[in-house]
Image: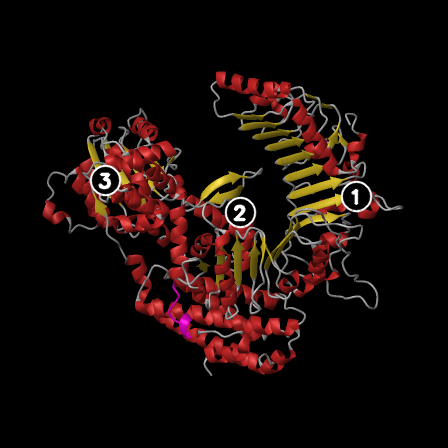
Amino acid sequence: MPVNQRITQLLGKKSQIDFETLRNQRSTMAAYASLLSLGHILDHILQHPPRQTAVLDKAQVDSLLEIIIFLQEFLEDFSLIRRDEIQGLEDKIARTANAAEDIIESRVVDQILGDAEAASERSSSTLFCQDLQNVIQEFDSMKKDAMKINETEGIKIIETAGSFIRGASDSKNTMVGFDKDLIQIVDTLTGDQSNLQILSIVGMGGIGKTTLAKNVFENPLIVQHFDRRAWVTVSQQFSVHELLLGLIKDVGVPAGENEREITRKNDGELGLCLHKSLSDRRYLIVMDDIWSIEVWDGIKRFLPNYSNGSRVLVTTRLSNVADSLCSCTPQELHFLDDDKSWTLFHDKVFGKESCPPELEEAGKTIVRNCKGLPLAIVAIGGLLAKSSRTLEYWEYVANDTSAALNMGGDGLCFEVLYLSYKHLPVHLKPCFLYMATFPEDSKIKISRLVKLWIAEGILKPIGSRSLEEIGEDNLKDLTDRNLIQVHDYGSRNKIKTCTIHDLLRDLCLKEAQKEKFLCVASVNSHPRSIDNKRRLVIHQQSPDEGEFHEQVFDAMNLLSCTRSLICQGFKCTEIKLPVCLRLLRVLSMLDVYSSVTETLQLVNLRYNYFESPTYKELLNILESLALLWNLQTVTIAGIVSFTESPINLPAEIWEMVQLRHLKMEEGDFYLPDPPSTNGENSRRDITVLKNLQTLYKIRNFRCTEEVVGRLPNLKKLGITYTQFPSGFGWDYYEVYNLAHLRNLESLFLDSAEENVLQHICFPHDSLKKLTLRKCGVSWEDLSVVGSLPHLEVLHLMDGAVIGSEWNPVEGEFLELKCLRMKLLDVEEWIAESSHFPCLEKLQLELLPFLEEIPYGIGEIQTLQSISLTYCSDSANSSAKKIQEEQQELGNYELQVHVREYSLGSLAMTVIDGVMEFGKTVWDSFRFW
């Protein structure tokens, strides 16, 4: 029986799949993402099968995994080939991979939920093995087809060469906002450096790289300074032969060569001609829009270096290419501000004329919608310059700027930006398109984004590296390609949040929906259009859309294959989950409430975010965790209403081998001891939680050797110690064993008990970030922290240290980059630059008694910023004086930010803060 019919029979009424709808929906990206997802599922079940289900046949799974890996490598090699037979094969791969997921996950879910009817009618072992074997046969057939294509098409990938455009445009290139960049590049190109130099201009597509390069190329100083100038625009698939021809035609054919015969020469002969033409000449070559280092490798040997000040200028969207090519810092272009954006728009639309007053407000709205991207401003300016100058039309464009941009200039913006997407390696495309799940102008938390990528199964495993590390590498790659922008860095200089330009987000949205990778439901789409979408995103822009989303959820009851449901912007409304989402893997519902009981029936979940559950709901969540066999990430957000009853994690937590991140943002819970391995009734198999990286926060954490042994890869740990029960002390909790968490990088420690630093042993070789809160230790005791060799971030919060004077010891805090102090009673801080030689950020908050910041701090060469929030007037003044002294020495990079309060407001803020802490060591503070 065909696989699609078999699955329809398997899943019954609850899970109808329209395979005809799916048949022609996929591309390389979608097929590749489907294979990755299926591979993760098989690996999970093979390595750690759920205890409630029968084990899969290992031989079948191994066979399937072998074929999946082969097809992944095939798609990686052929991702740029768009031949009909490749497209047809991709469709089959995606369809069959999704079918296999449905077969396997349906069986697991049925058995976990104890569905007797399903077990007997749809999921018997014999039928399941038959269905899986049918899938293997289909995959095996596709592998044979791929091997045939490999034989006939493989060499063409290497030999394929695209066209190139020679010569800079003769048209006028309007340049606004990059005058300083122009001056700096011209100065460098005409500078005294005699050796051949390669300079680069870097930025996202449409940012203005080519326009700036053309203005440099045509600048009178450049024209006068260089004897020879040449310009080539390089395509993604370049030809060295064509590039060399273009350069020769620009700089001139050398004497003795026939122009008609020169095109017949091979690459080496053309290179010698170019070398002759440039000999003893000071030349400038501009290579526009380079996508790979191989372009430079193909021609650099033909460029003479006579130490006469010759230069090469390249433009690229890829930061890593610029870094590889150039020894000097790339010239990175950024978005225009509002004033420069308006100037560029005005010049494009009106030239020397004035903007009619009635159009100015609508015009500025249009410009703001372009978000500082010159290409967008020029494209829409060109559209409006040729269109009716009526207020009605301009307001229409202002209300739908994105559509107007892709209409004007035959969709110029989209085509330019699409090149960046097309050039992505296939393993990065799903990660990039996933950005469409976030609303416009979102500040996207990287920690959440990477967790979602992992839960979706779209990250390609690499050796022994963790998926989190791979996700961070993919993120870095996307930022290097200028497809997403860094918004903020965290305390360890890792990217904390990112953004994506609206036009690139529109590109993600169009491509993701075109390739059926995900569906974003909107008021402009019919609710039934979401049928058979594996990833569904719902953004509520306004309360008026509530009725539409009710229709969407009603339509979802007809779905069978939805694996991800992402809802945002519902303004804390409550929704009822569709009953059919039995195979759901990702449930991300920010500001949306749903029944915890409903959620906990979704036993296939990998990612869940619980928003402000009640105490009773929290108990239900924790008691039911063991059913969620596939769970990777669970975050409990918001303040939970606590009672005197303890909040315990279930003992089954020690069997949740897929768990990667368990976090309670407010409050904490108790971690049970691992099941005993001694005695007649004890279990002999010890489960190690190799994937668990985040455990936050645990109350009265008992850190025994057995606990440490079961958490070998823990990276982030939050622990709180309340007043110990009678008869218990630090020895009982064995906190000295923390030293054996050899991969722990971040530790949050909150303790109401005394002498915590005298008993605890930190992981000496791995700890990079430490937060102490309410510990009440002395400044002298802090030496144990200062001796940590790799500590980069230290947060001293809310009475973490008590004492009026801090005099750090020389040789401590040698790698510290970020120091934050909040709500401490310190008055005098004595330090020199040598005490914190690597400090980059200093953050001081609510320090009413601190007299001043040590002036030696300002002499730290790495220091980038000092921020003070509600500190004493004298401390504020000392920070400003440090900045003034540094500016007198020529250091204008040090940023000082001071936020002041009146004395009355400051007192109220401090009192409010203390009341939050309740009964803590604050009782012992001399100033309360």
Up/down of 886 relative to 552, above or below:
above
How crowded is the residue under tag 2: few (<14 C-alpha within 10 Å), some, or many (20+)? Answer: some
Image x and y of residue 725, in percent: 86, 46
| SS type, badge 1 | loop
Q: Where does label 1 land, which residue?
A: 722
- Helix, strand, or loop for circle 3? strand
Label 1 Cα crowd, 10 Å radius (few <14 / some 14-19 / many 20+)? few
Q: Is residue 26 magenta?
A: yes
Q: Is the C-beta separation of discs 1 and 2 under 8 Å?
A: no
Range of magenta residues = 20-27
Residue occupying the point 49% across, 49% down: 473
Q: Which residue is mark 2?
A: 446
Q: Please identify the residue farthest to the right as the structure is shown.
A: 727
Disc nearer the start of the sequence (1/2): 2
Q: Is residue 319 left or right of residue 577?
A: left
Within 10 Å of the Cα at label 3, are there few (<14), some (14-19), or many (20+) other Cα atoms?
many
Q: Residue at x 42, y 69 (%)?
A: 93
Q: Nearer the viewer, residue 826 or 553?
A: 553
Name the residue that disc number 3 marks.
231
Q: Nearer the viewer, mark 1 or mark 3?
A: 1
What separation in Å lies between label 2 and label 3 (alpha carbons)?
40 Å
Query: CA–CA distance between discs 1 and 3?
Result: 70 Å
